[in-house]
Image (cartoon, rainbow, N blue to C red):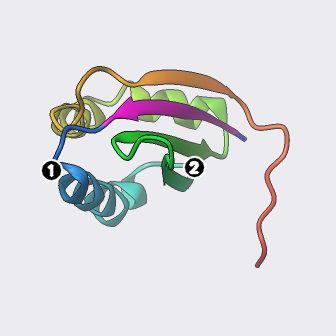
Amino acid sequence: MYGTVATMRVKPGMEAKLNELSDRWWRERASKIRGAMSETVYKKDSNSNEYIMAVIFDSKENYDTNAGDPEQDRWFQEFRACLESDPVWNDGEVVFHQHQR
């Protein structure tokens, strides 16, 4: 598995738009993208406009394919417009992932 953990600052009043964009990605894009497994977004207690997002794909190859897709870039440009600055990305191999079924 492979993914990213991103930290980002959301513009005031843009939380609902971010949620809508995420829902739209999973509804419209996920079925077209191989290997997309999960997304989890946290809003920090210490600062309500700071978010942490964790995304997991089944492989680095599928993660990179999605990242290089022009359609993904179009989606990201809408996503980025909701943020104060570019996210800080921390890509890497997932070495442990557990969830209750």
* Separation of marks 1 and 2 at Cα, in angstroms: 32 Å
Q: Main secondary structure of the magenta part?
A: strand
Furthest residue toward front: 46
Q: Mark 1 or 2 closer to N-term?
A: 1
- The magenta segment: 2-9
Q: Secondary structure at mark 2?
A: loop
Which residue corresponds to the image point at 79% horizontal and 51% vertical from the top-left? Answer: 97
Locate residue 70: give its quadrant.
top left
Q: Is residue 49 left or right of residue 46?
A: left
Residue 96 location in percent, x, y? 84, 45
Q: Is residue 16 above or below residue 33?
A: below
**Three-letter residue code for mark 2:** Gly
- Between 64 and 26, the residue placed more toward the observer is 26
Is residue 4 magenta-colored?
Answer: yes
* Quadrant holding the C terminus: bottom right
For label 2, count other residues whose C-alpha is less than 10 Å away and answer few (under 14), some (14-19) or many (20+). Answer: many
